[in-house]
């Protein structure tokens, strides 16, 4: 079991670093600046993801009277915004990918600093037994370094050596995806009994309610065309699991009960958001933007094979 914990810790580091490095390689400063100019949208997204979603997670855990491990897992996820998978969901749903990817990067960066303090505030207010708390300073430093530094390096490479950045992005994304699968597999292996026990439990029902409510709030609060609002909406329930796994390792020594609940909640969340994104995609004719951040929609149209017109 100690070997599994060690591998899990290594996998979490690889997941966070590769994910944020890939985000930097795929982001242009022009795209970030353009998105940040929409001050109203930025403020609404920050309020939803840094304030409302953590409160939704806390409220859901209270309503369903979750046991402490599941309570901790749901609150940690709710306090960790900026999952890279949200940008992928924007592509799947044929939404506003440039805005979604830029906001995801912003949320991941800000979330590096707010994740641990927000979770600790909720744990303190909830009066959980056993003195549940996070080492805020250590976690903020760890998560900030692992997320912000790789992103800054990737962003610099994209700005100064664009061809290299584009070439490196594909394998980096593969590493990120594989490391996420590895982390989930190791968490599952280390806590499969606890995960099996969740089947039919209130934990999974609470996770379902959390995802639906978070998406609804995120969509309703957002501004802009419907494709932008649903893209922003799916930023809310999809949380950044890398810092959460790091927190479980640092503060809870990879507790099997917390890992089991965390893995179950993440898997259910992925299923719910994939279904939502697919549902929107079936109702849209074509992608509104090119998948890579900073590339204008027309660039995608120019590369698509042209269909021949046929006479009736």
Image: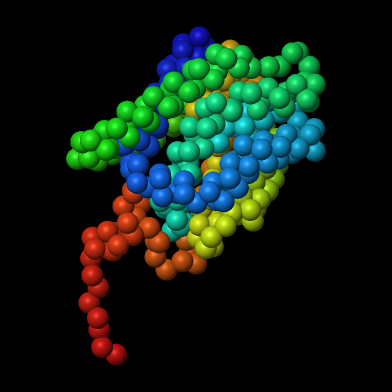
Q: Is residue 214 above or below residue 188?
A: below
Residue 94 % position (x, y): 43, 58
State the image quarter where residue 255 is shown: top right
Residue 89 % position (x, y): 47, 49
**Front-lying residue, 14 or 53:** 53
Q: Is residue 2 above or below residue 181?
A: above
- Identify the residue at image location x=68%, y=17%: 133
**Front-lying residue, 175 or 135:** 135
**Front-lying residue, 59 or 31:** 31
Q: Residue furthest bottom?
A: 312
Residue 27 % position (x, y): 35, 41
Does residue 261 appear in this view? no
Q: Residue furthest top?
A: 2
- Identify the residue at image location x=53%, y=60%: 224
- Identify the residue at image location x=64%, y=17%: 134
- Identify the residue at image location x=26%, y=33%: 157
Residue 96 % position (x, y): 45, 56
């Amino acid at each position: 079991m100690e070997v599994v914990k060690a591998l899990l810790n290594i996998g979490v580091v690889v997941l966070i670093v590769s994910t944020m490095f890939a985000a930097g390689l795929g982001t242009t400063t022009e795209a970030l600046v353009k998105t940040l100019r929409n001050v109203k949208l930025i403020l609404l997204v920050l309020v939803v993801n840094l304030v409302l979603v953590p409160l939704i997670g806390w409220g859901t855990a209270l309503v369903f009277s979750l046991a402490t491990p599941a309570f901790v897992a749901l609150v940690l996820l709710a306090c960790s915004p900026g999952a890279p998978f949200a940008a992928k969901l924007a592509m799947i749903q044929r939404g506003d990918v440039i805005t979604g990817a830029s906001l995801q990067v912003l949320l991941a960066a800000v979330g590096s600093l707010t994740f641990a303090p927000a979770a600790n505030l909720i744990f303190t207010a909830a009066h959980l037994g056993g003195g549940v708390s996070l080492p805020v300073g250590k976690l903020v430093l760890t998560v900030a370094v692992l997320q912000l530094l790789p992103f800054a390096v990737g962003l610099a490479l994209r700005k100064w050596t664009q061809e290299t950045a584009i070439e490196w992005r594909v394998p980096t994304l593969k590493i990120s995806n594989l490391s996420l699968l590895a982390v989930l597999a190791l968490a599952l292996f280390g806590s499969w009994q606890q995960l099996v026990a969740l089947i039919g439990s209130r934990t999974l029902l609470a996770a379902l309610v959390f995802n639906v409510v978070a998406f609804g709030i995120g969509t309703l609060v957002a501004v802009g065309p419907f494709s932008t609002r649903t893209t922003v909406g799916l930023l809310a329930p999809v949380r950044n699991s890398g810092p959460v796994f790091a927190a479980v390792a640092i503060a809870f020594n990879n507790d099997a009960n917390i890992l089991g609940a965390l893995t179950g909640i993440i898997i259910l969340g992925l299923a719910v958001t994939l279904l939502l994104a697919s549902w929107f995609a079936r109702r849209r004719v074509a992608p509104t933007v090119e998948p890579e951040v900073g590339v204008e929609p027309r660039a995608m149209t120019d590369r698509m094979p042209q269909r021949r017109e046929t006479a009736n």
